[in-house]
Image (spheres, rainbow, N blue to C red):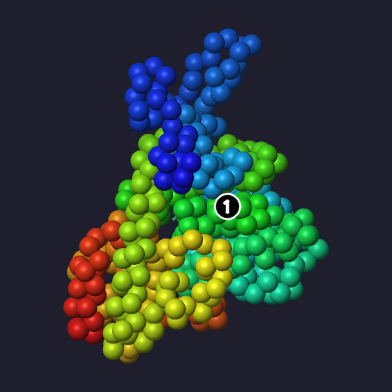
Amino acid sequence: MGFTTKQIHAGVRPDPITGSIVTPVYQTTTYVQESVDQYLAKGYSYSRSANPTVTALEHKLTVLENGHACTCYSTGMAAIQAVLQASLSAGDHAVISDVAYGGTYRLCTKIYQRFGVEFTFADTSNPSAVSAALRDNTRLILTETPANPTLKLTDIAAISEIATSKGIPHAVDNTFLTPYYQRPLELGADIVIHSTTKYFDGHNATVGGAVVTKNAQWDDAIRFIQNATGVIMSPWVAWLTMQGAKTLSVRMDRQSANAMAVAKFLESHSKVERVCYPGLASFSQRELARRQSSGSGAMLWFEVRGGAQAGKRLMDAVELCSLAENLGSVETLITHPVTMTHADVEPEERARVGITDGLVRLSVGLEDEQDIIDDLSQALELV
Ligand SMILES: *Cc1c(COP(=O)(O)O)cnc(C)c1O
């Protein structure tokens, strides 16, 4: 079956009692057991451990990422934490992409370092930099590709090969492209992470996360963390995310087409210094993008001539585009990473990895392409 059929039907069965075609929200804390001897006979005991609505979403994401199993979390950060907790102990070391979601960097440097875990933030777009960063105590390689916000790509197959040869798990944050365009497990990765807040929800309605694993060993380790630390997704969020997931490919296709049109418009505009979008011929890692993903996604960034001040004037001048954090939703969102999503990354570190003060991030939405272009066009006249 094709991806679009699977995104609608995988994990979902008509409700056994009523026939309801949409999985109900099982809004319950506990589950009545038949007898002490038949404890857990129906698979559920307490909603911190598992919940049928959450389970349905987990099954769907497992199928879409072509994995062994999935666990869902209260947020994307909780999903990333579960992977860190399942793989690292005090004294261990992890290699992380030097460009990644700002919250990932903050979690590692501000919290896990306090517990005695060491990190190297490496340029994972360069496999030899990853090999060079490995130590005897390295227990995890975590990459994000395309990276938030610079869109730098990591070669998933090459890094997975390095990881496998050393017996280290390779986890990939696949939030930006989703399994519709990129499936890291098929390229050799062990674990896939999502902020479902973004494209799976797609409607700016929830925050959530997911971890899809390749085998039972990793699933057991991570599922234990999901229960022990109490970070499971709520049934209501799972229900909304499942409804969003049913239209993922349709939204991704349309939003990517919009992003391509917007990127071309910006590239040809005299007030725009540069544009970065993986679908443009000018994208520096075009060949890798083609090799490991089947689409370019709907995230892009650009710099306005006149630097940070001009960029800020543009972000204040847009009307249809919303100045907001988040990405992947039907609404076009414009973000200033230095002030917003990556404010907790030190200025020197930001400069080192290319997150400039003038970088404007655009999450292209589902509106009519001409309306998005018209809005940016009128705003560019004002800078
Ligand atoms: C947003 C985001 C996260 C964090 O997810 P939350 O749901 O906001 O906790 C992690 N990784 C990437 C790539 C993101 O864009």
Crowd band around label 1 with a 10 angstrom C-alpha radius: few (<14), some (14–19), many (20+)? many
Q: Nearer the viewer, residue 273 or 360?
A: 273
Picture coordinates of residue 227 (x, y %)? 58, 36
Tally of marks: 1
Q: Residue at x 55, y 73 (%)?
A: 287
Picture coordinates of residue 12 (x, y %)? 44, 32
191 sits to left or right of 72:
right
Quadrant assignment, res 45: top right
Quarter placement of the C terminus: bottom left
Say if residue 286 shows up in the picture.
Answer: yes
Q: Nearer the viewer, residue 332 or 90?
A: 332
52 w.r.t. 60: above or below: above
308 sits to left or right of 212:
left
Q: Nearer the viewer, residue 284 or 25?
A: 284
**What kind of residue is marked 1?**
Val
120 sits to left or right of 249:
right
124 w.r.t. 200: above or below: below
Residue at the far front in the pictured view: 1
Query: Secondary structure under badge 1?
Result: strand
Say if residue 329 shows up in the picture.
Answer: no
Picture coordinates of residue 363 (x, y %)? 35, 65
Picture coordinates of residue 259 (x, y %)? 34, 68
5 w.r.t. 94: above or below: above
Q: Residue at x 69, y 75 (%)?
A: 129
Q: Residue at x 26, y 78 (%)?
A: 314
Q: Nearer the viewer, residue 163 or 221?
A: 163
149 sits to left or right of 33:
left
- The residue under label 1 is 192
Q: Residue at x 48, y 57 (%)?
A: 181
